[in-house]
Image (cartoon, rainbow, N blue to C red):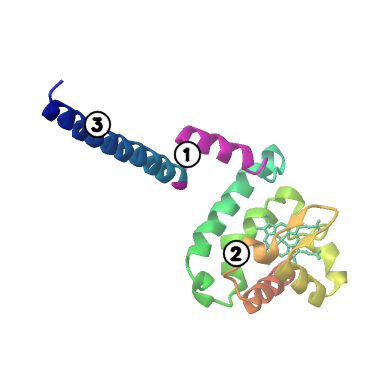
């Protein structure tokens, strides 16, 4: 072998060796980068997770109560959109007819109706207690009275005015 062939082989091996080292370095760097990124979540897996942790059920008020309760809940949701419920009115009739009637006129879910056997029988509890139960919510033997009838946008004064209107309109 001639001398310049040996020189060439030596230099060529050096270049190949250097390039191999760079390649290995890049592979290691890439796998490090890959490991440091958060993994992608399969959207189907995310959906399954959501379904697993969703609440199991909703309030069931019997076949007859369900429809009016759903209507009352829908009305509540619509009303809750506006900041001050019903324009801040203190007219109990307006609030009752828009919100409370959904349960208290039909007796849905055990809500006492505006008659002697219903709300009439509760007058003896005293207006203060009835006010408080309407504002804070109340779970009694008959069912669940949601706080402020389910509309947190109502002020305490509005709820008190509505309870007073109910107590004044017992037939
Ligand atoms: C989702 C149905 C529902 C809505 C809407 C609702 N109520 Fe009731 N309410 C009930 C039920 C059920 C009870 C009976 C709870 C019990 O005694 O077991 C009740 C009870 C009451 C009582 C009697 C509490 C007591 O201590 O005996 C008052 C007062 C009252 N509601 C006022 C209101 C007012 C005012 C509104 C509207 C702002 C309203 N409710 C809206 C279901 C409802």
Mark sitting earlier along the chain (3/2): 3
Query: How far across and down, in percent of the image, does residue 75 sit?
Result: 54, 56
Label placed on residue 72: none
- Residue plotted at (73% across, 49% down): 109
> Looking at the image, which is closer to me, 144 or 90?
144
> Looking at the image, which is closer to me, 111 or 20?
20
User: Would residue 18 appear left or right of 75 to someone viewing this image?
Assistant: left
Q: Is mark 2 within 8 Å of ligand 1?
A: yes
Element under disc 3:
helix
- Residue plotted at (57% across, 49% down): 71
User: Would residue 25 appear left or right of 16 to someone viewing this image?
Assistant: right
Tell me the quarter of the image containing the N terminus. top left
Circle 3 sits on which residue?
13
Query: How far across and down, in percent of the image, does residue 165 sit?
Result: 68, 72
Confirm whether the magenta stretch covers residue 43: yes
Q: Are marks 2 and 1 in contact (CB under 8 Å)?
A: no
Q: Residue furthest top?
A: 1
Label 1 crowd (10 A; few <14 / some 14-19 / many >=20): few
Circle 1 sits on which residue?
41
User: Would residue 8 appear left or right of 65 to someone viewing this image?
Assistant: left
> Looking at the image, which is closer to me, 89 or 28?
28
Please give the range of residues in magenta.
Answer: 36-56
Label 3 crowd (10 A; few <14 / some 14-19 / many >=20): few
Circle 2 sits on which residue?
151
Of the residues tagged 3 and 2, which is closer to the observer? 3
């Amino acid at each position: 072998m001639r001398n310049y062939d040996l020189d060439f082989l030596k230099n060529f091996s050096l270049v190949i060796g250097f390039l191999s080292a760079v390649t290995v370095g890049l592979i290691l760097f890439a796998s490090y980068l890959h490991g440091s990124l958060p993994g992608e979540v399969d959207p189907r897996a995310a959906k399954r997770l959501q379904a697993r942790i969703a609440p199991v059920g909703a309030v069931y008020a019997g076949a007859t109560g369900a429809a009016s309760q759903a209507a009352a809940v829908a009305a509540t949701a619509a009303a809750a959109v506006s900041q001050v419920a019903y324009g801040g009115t203190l007219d109990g009739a307006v609030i009752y007819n828009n919100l409370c009637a959904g349960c208290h006129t039909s007796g849905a879910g055990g809500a006492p109706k505006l008659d002697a056997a219903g709300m009439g029988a509760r007058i003896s509890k005293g207006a203060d207690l009835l006010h408080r139960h309407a504002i804070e919510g109340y779970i009694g033997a008959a069912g669940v009275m949601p706080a402020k009838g389910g509309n947190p946008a109502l002020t305490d004064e509005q709820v008190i005015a509505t309870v007073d209107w109910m107590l004044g309109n017992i037939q």
